[in-house]
Image: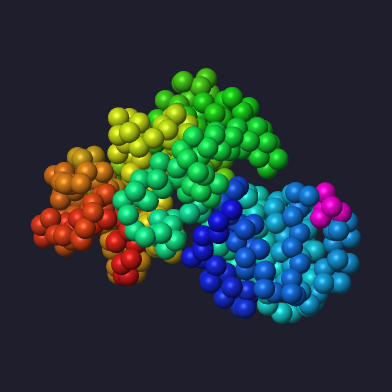
Amino acid sequence: MKYINRQISNLITQYLQHFPAVAILGPRQCGKSTLAKQIIKDNPNSVYLDLEKISDRNKLNDPEMFFRINSNKLICLDEIQKQPELFSTLRSIIDENNRNGQFLILGSASRDLIKQSSETLAGRIIYTHLTPFTLSEINEDNQKTNNVLLEYWVKGGFPRSYLSVNNRISMAWRNSFVETFLQRDLPQMGYNIPPELALRLWKMCAHTQGQLLNASKFGDSLGLNHLTVRKYIDLFHGTFMLRILNPFFANVKKRLVKAPKIYLRDTGILHSLLNINTINDLYNHPVYGSSWETLVIENVLQKYNSWDSGYYRTSNGAEIDLVLEKGLKKIAIECKVSTTPKPSKGYYIAMEDLKLKSGFIIAPINGEPYPLNEKATVISLDDFLKLEF
């Protein structure tokens, strides 16, 4: 399969020079293993173990001995959540060797992995997060065209989905991914949720994505209480399938909406759950606008992952889809799926509330950015991702 360069690869290489252990976390099939192999391929002093393979797991029957024999090498442990008991051994080996670049650890969306490692490897490990392909990564590999954007939007960013030869094969892969995730991956991670129930909840999230989370309403439909629904929502969030976007709390004298919004994190999986096969299917579907919102928010937050983020909404209807804040810098982003976007009155009220002079309207336009007025600049997603703040 064709390799598309991942923008995070240089950062991971730098971290390996400065930290004993580097973890790459992300959903299944997003390209963690491929990226890790690419990073270590020119390093003869490296060992790669896939802990899903019995033969590789057998090498760690005596992990302390294996690590000591390979103490001068970079050891890559893929799917480490299969053997969480390794973390205590890793700590002693890291302290014994006392050097950087000892371990590259890959984990598939496991909050237990984060918990285990944070307890035993505190001060010895740094985390990175890999998502499916971003638009910037895809555009680096292609001549920028609107067709590339549309294909990426429909198929999503999971490598095997995006790189499929056509929509039919891509949809078949995504349907298989959903089935495997529910029936195999969740149980292997230790989550006991019936696959049929999980699928119903996931589809309900797809139909209402981009809206405020109403756990009680979901519970009424599923025959569950709202606490159980929220537990399962957190499960999907913890496995990188859903994004819980919390409200942006500003120091304003307005009554703010406090419920989080939910988004599916990959448009391809969203479209699979809703049986949307083509861009024409999407045009005619109620999720059209919120699907674009997902595409924008995931790409923006991947680039600005160190910024605080949230949506802004008051009880009076003032609203901005995404607000980013870092120190004294604050950026307002509105997502519009029209080629001639016009923000609502609520956008301008929200800008006044937050004392922002100007914001960005990210829309699927061709051509250069242009000011709509003194409060809003219309810009394509690709051009916005090239900006530096």
Measuring 86% from the left and 72% from the top, which residue is drawn there? Answer: 69
Question: Foreground residue, 360 or 48?
Answer: 48
Picture coordinates of residue 111, whole percent (x, y): 61, 50
The residue positioned farthest toward the left in the image shown: 373
Residue 174 relative to residue 211: left or right: right
* Numbered label tally: 0
Question: Image height check: is 381 above or below 204?
Answer: below
Residue 306 relative to residue 389: left or right: right
Is residue 382 a member of the stretch shown in magenta? Answer: no
Picture coordinates of residue 178, whole percent (x, y): 56, 35
Measuring 42% from the left and 63% from the top, which residue is drawn there? Answer: 140
Residue 127, by quadrant, is bottom right
Q: Is residue 40 visible?
A: yes
Question: Foreground residue, 347 or 313?
Answer: 347
Residues shaded magenta? 54-58
Residue 102 relative to residue 228: left or right: right
Picture coordinates of residue 15, whole percent (x, y): 58, 73
Query: Principal SS element in the magenta part?
Result: helix
Measuring 23% from the left and 54% from the top, which residue is drawn there? Answer: 366
Please, which colouring scheme is shown?
Answer: rainbow
Question: Foreground residue, 215 or 172?
Answer: 172
Question: Image height check: is 228 above or below 322?
Answer: above
Q: Is residue 158 visible?
A: no
